[in-house]
Image (cartoon, grey):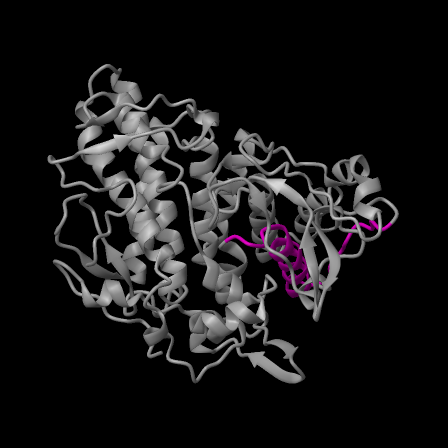
Amino acid sequence: MKSILLNTIKIAALLLVIGLSSCEKYLDIVPKGKKIPATLADFDALLRDEYGNQRMDITQAILLLNDKFETSSNLSYYKLYNANYNWDESADRIAFNNSDEGTYYNAYAAISTSNLIITNAGTATESSDADRKQLIAQAKILRALNYFVLANYYADTYEEATAASKLSVPLILSADIGAAYTQVSIKELYAFMLKDIEEALPDLRAQGATILHANLGSAYALAARIHLQMGQYAQALSAANEALKQNDKLYDWTEFYNKYKTQIEAPDQYINAPSPMGYDFVENYSFRHGVREYASTEVNIRTDRATRFEQGDARFNSRWKLRTVGADTYYKSITIGFYNYGGLTTTEVYLIKAECQARQDDISGAMNTLNAVRVKRILPQYYTALSAATVQDAVKLIQRTKGNELILGIMPFADMRRLNKDPDYARTLTKKENGTSLSLSPASHLWTMPFPQGAIKNAGNGTITQNVNK
């Protein structure tokens, strides 16, 4: 496989020469120069590298969902962007995917770092046994988190009836360059992720050294996410409840809106308020960047996507504002800073819990859990507690909120793929683009992304089979 050891992992197990440098003042790491990792601090610096290991690029999934506004110039220049954004089922995305490799290589770089730590940190010096075990456990959570993204990007969604017979992604357990690997089944990969979490839990603590380090809350949150994706609602609910024991805080977006109300509501003003969704966001279990690891504004939102937010949604109104520039009209980002697109938060866990309650016929409990989130989002003059008469109605209401709350992360994409397999929830996306009506079927092959050409052509010590035809 084309070197999976980009970014931080330019290594061969015992032949490591790594520059350990500070990526963010927040982490307060002193550059150590080039050396072979030996102390626990050396290994720990690898885990917390933000540029390589704490960043997840899922651009094509966001484009496919039309969860962002894309410029006509980008669509014209990037053929893969256009194919996904405009739902072109005739496009040969495999041929186009010769440069959009960030999702694949970022994830496997972080996995390689995890493998290095898991294999070697047990003998790290200048540490206690408990601290060594904790770091290894944190590496296992990081590895499982990256495999979840890969599995829900490059392979079909989990279905119990077919999971054992369909291929997922390469399962790599070594940081060695040229290590052998196997492209395992979807069932095998999900079992591996859950095994990583189960093995990590006894050695994790309530808090890590930084928000980049996995803790008990993030481990249980990830377990809840994986079990939900597998349709294992009882297990997902149990894990969600354990995560909420560690942190059940919700950010009050109505307060944020009122604090910045004047500039938010001022016509033709696009002043950026500070993003509250950074390292110290009260909802964080763990933090990971999206495509950008630097302070920035968010991407802009399509006008038709904006209509799917509830009226009076302070979270949406605080982040985007309608703007027209030339021929383009969109919702412009009006916050700046850092955003936890790739980590795990209490909001996701609350909404996992709500869906699991509904699936187990506790509809009133599900609505109470959903409304606990909504009351912190919807401005009082618009807020009404939601109720549902059926499981299907409850799940649809929960998913509406979840898709909006977790926009620009992997879960709206993963959830829609999962729900598209169920006729009660499958949904065809529609839009008009330059006067042409377009649609995306729940059964479309576009819901699975093709492996990049670099991975296929340079497969290394293993083989990779594409999971889509184009």
> Looking at the rendering, which quadrant does residue 114 occupy?
top left
Please tell me which residue is depicted at 31% across the width and 42% down the height of the picture: 196
Please tell me which residue is depicted at 76% across the width and 43% down the height of the picture: 375
In the rendered image, is residue 422 in sight? no
Q: Is residue 260 above or below residue 165?
A: above
Please tell me which residue is depicted at 28% across the width and 23% down the height of the picture: 32
Q: Quadrant of the N terminus?
A: bottom left
Q: Which residues are magenta?
A: 382-409
Residue 57 in picture, x, y percent from top left: 43, 53
Residue 127 in picture, x, y percent from top left: 26, 16
Horizontal side, residue 182 vs residue 344: left or right: left
Q: Quadrant of the C terminus?
A: bottom left
Q: Nearer the viewer, residue 179 or 354?
A: 179
Q: Nearer the viewer, residue 324 or 143?
A: 324
Please tell me which residue is depicted at 79% across the width and 45% down the height of the picture: 264
Q: Nearer the viewer, residue 321 or 147?
A: 321
> Looking at the rendering, which quadrant does residue 104 occupy?
bottom left
Q: Is residue 442 above or below residue 240?
A: below
Q: Is residue 366 above or below residue 49?
A: below
Residue 426 in picture, x, y percent from top left: 56, 72
In the rendered image, is residue 72 in sight? yes
Q: Is residue 416 above or below residue 195?
A: below
